[in-house]
């Protein structure tokens, strides 16, 4: 049976190939091991194999796992975040990928101020406009960036999307391309507190295509830890 380490190495090799194909450097791509629903020993196994970035979609799981992992393990909040959970998660999350409203951004700003920190966030974009998904519409993003950039305890690091579930990853190439283009358009505006250096896109089924299209963070769960 393949171990978590084998899976990690396979994903890393695929990232390397996708980078080679698209003339990028593998150092530009951070692999986030999506450990949601998985027990701590599996995270520890991934850590032993070199994983440092972990993705969780529930605040409760981050609160449970983060204090039990080595200090240099980083936890990313990738799931929908309720405003009343912001205060709890903020001290533990290195990056919140799922900011999808002005109200949520405002809440994060307020709690960050109380903690005396600058919270790093991504704006979640529903590129394919799927009704079942969270995230802002692509055409809303420039205006939202302007508004959210006014909050002084927030730093917008870039954009995130969850692409549709498809049988053929090539079908998501236009989705990834569109998010990339959106980030380029926003970067050109040179807004204070806005960085656009992160593009969080690509999951187990389509991360190679996402890397080819400019992803700087990919979020892989099943491909590392097995089915949930
Ligand atoms: C679960 C999840 C992933 C990982 O999905 P896999 O298909 O298991 O790789 C990535 N991103 C988000 C936001 C998720 O909720």
Image (spheres, helix red, strand yellow):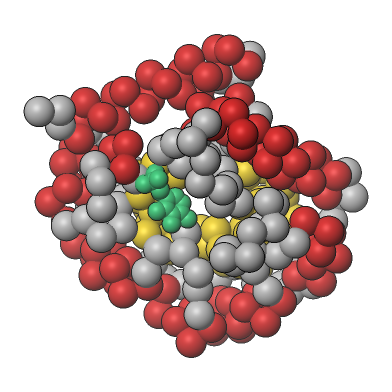
Q: In this view, which residue lies farthest toward the right? A: 189
Q: In this view, which residue lies farthest toward the bottom? A: 84
Is residue 15 positioned above or below 146 on the image? above
Q: Position of residue 74 (x, y in %)?
A: 37, 52
Q: Position of residue 45 (x, y in %)?
A: 16, 41
Q: Position of residue 182 (x, y in %)?
A: 79, 46
Residue 49, located in which quarter of the rendered image? top left
Residue 146, located in which quarter of the rendered image? bottom right
| Residue at figure coordinates x 61%, y 25% from the top left | 212
Q: In this view, which residue lies farthest toward the left? A: 1
Give the camera-side residue of 48 and 14: 14
Quadrant that contains the N terminus: top left
| Drawn side of residue 194 relative to residue 78, left or right | right
| Residue at figure coordinates x 24%, y 42% from the top left | 226
| Drawn side of residue 186 relative to residue 161, left or right | right
Is residue 130 positioned above or below 18 on the image? below
Is residue 92 positioned above or below 75 on the image? below
């Amino acid at each position: 049976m393949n171990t978590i380490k084998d899976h990690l190495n396979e994903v890393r090799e695929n990232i390397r190939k996708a980078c080679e194909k698209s003339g990028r450097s593998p150092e530009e791509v951070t692999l986030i091991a999506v450990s949601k629903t998985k027990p701590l020993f599996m995270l520890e196994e991934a850590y032993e194999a070199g994983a440092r970035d972990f993705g969780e979609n529930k605040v409760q799981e981050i609160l449970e796992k983060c204090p039990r992992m080595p200090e240099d393990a980083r936890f990313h909040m990738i799931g929908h975040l309720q405003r009343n959970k912001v205060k709890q998660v903020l001290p533990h999350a290195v990056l919140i990928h799922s900011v999808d409203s002005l109200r949520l951004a405002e809440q994060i700003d307020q709690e960050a101020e109380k903690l005396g920190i600058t919270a790093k966030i991504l704006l979640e974009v529903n590129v394919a406009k799927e009704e079942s998904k969270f995230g802002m519409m692509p055409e809303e993003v420039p205006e939202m960036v302007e508004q959210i950039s006014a909050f002084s305890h927030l730093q917008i690091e870039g954009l995130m999307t969850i692409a549709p579930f498809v049988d053929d990853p090539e079908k998501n190439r236009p989705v990834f391309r569109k998010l990339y283009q959106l980030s380029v358009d926003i970067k050109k505006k040179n807004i204070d507190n806005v960085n656009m250096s992160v593009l969080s896109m690509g999951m187990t089924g389509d991360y190679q295509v996402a890397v080819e299209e400019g992803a700087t963070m990919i979020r892989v769960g099943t491909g590392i830890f097995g089915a949930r």
